[in-house]
Amino acid sequence: IKDPTYVRPQKAAKKMKLAQSMNQTVYLYGVTGSGKTSLVRDMLNRRTYSYYSAEETNLEEIQISKDFKEQIIVIDDLYLVTDQQLREEYAALLKKLIAQRNIWLILISRSSIPRWLMPLYVQQIFLVIDEEDLNLSRKEQDAYFEKWNLHLTSDTADEIFRITGGNPLTLR
């Protein structure tokens, strides 16, 4: 279901499109409310994809297409993978997924690439979308307020942007 008030941050969207065109693994990170999952849902709105939360999913539940059709797999909440054994299992699974050229992998977490994923990142070079990329530009902020039917003076909008930096959570 498309959120009628969502405004796609173009800096992050351009990176996602580039990664998609090259079938490159994407690693999105930012604090809660920064728009990571919203961006992914908006970008994949008309596409079929599998979404898994590391909090709610056992590794065995992550389904890989047996017929080698193109597949998009999103794994969210990676920051919750704290057990060493589970980290090793996740790293092995992610390596396997990345090796399959028919899978586009999107990883979402709250922090930058953790130490346990660093070897895979170095070998495979993830495209990283960080909190700054998820912030709205001044023009995007105006579009966001317009969707909420808020009509601000230019000075007020400038001040809000100066204070928030376009951070979606703060704007909300």
Image (cartoon, helix red, strand yellow):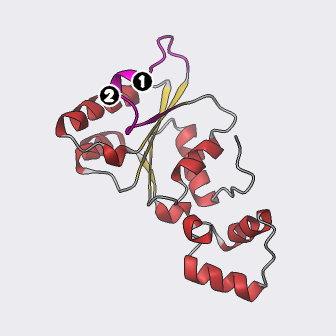
> Looking at the picture, does residue 63 appear above or below residue 20?
above
Quadrant position of the C terminus in the picture: bottom right
Dot 2 crowding, Cα within 10 Å, few <14, some 14–19, many 20+: some
Q: Amino acid at mark 2?
A: Leu
Residue designated by label 2: 93
Question: In this rendering, would 60 be left or right of 30?
Answer: left
Residue 78 position in % (x across, y down):
36, 44
Q: Amino acid at mark 1?
A: Gln
Residue 67 falls inside the magenta stretch: yes
Give me the residue at 47% from left, 62% from top.
131
Tag 2's secondary structure? helix
Question: In this rendering, would 90 be left or right of 139?
Answer: left
Give me the residue at 81% from left, 76% from top.
151
Tag 1's secondary structure? loop
Question: In this rendering, would 124 be left or right of 30?
Answer: left
Residue designated by label 1: 100
Dot 1 crowding, Cα within 10 Å, few <14, some 14–19, many 20+: some
Q: Which residues are magenta?
A: 51-69
Residue 69 position in % (x across, y down):
55, 17
Question: In this rendering, would 125 be left or right of 82?
Answer: right
Residue 142 position in % (x across, y down):
74, 71
> Looking at the picture, does residue 44 appear above or below residue 171?
above
For residue 168, what is the image quadrant? Answer: bottom right
Residue 119 falls inside the magenta stretch: no
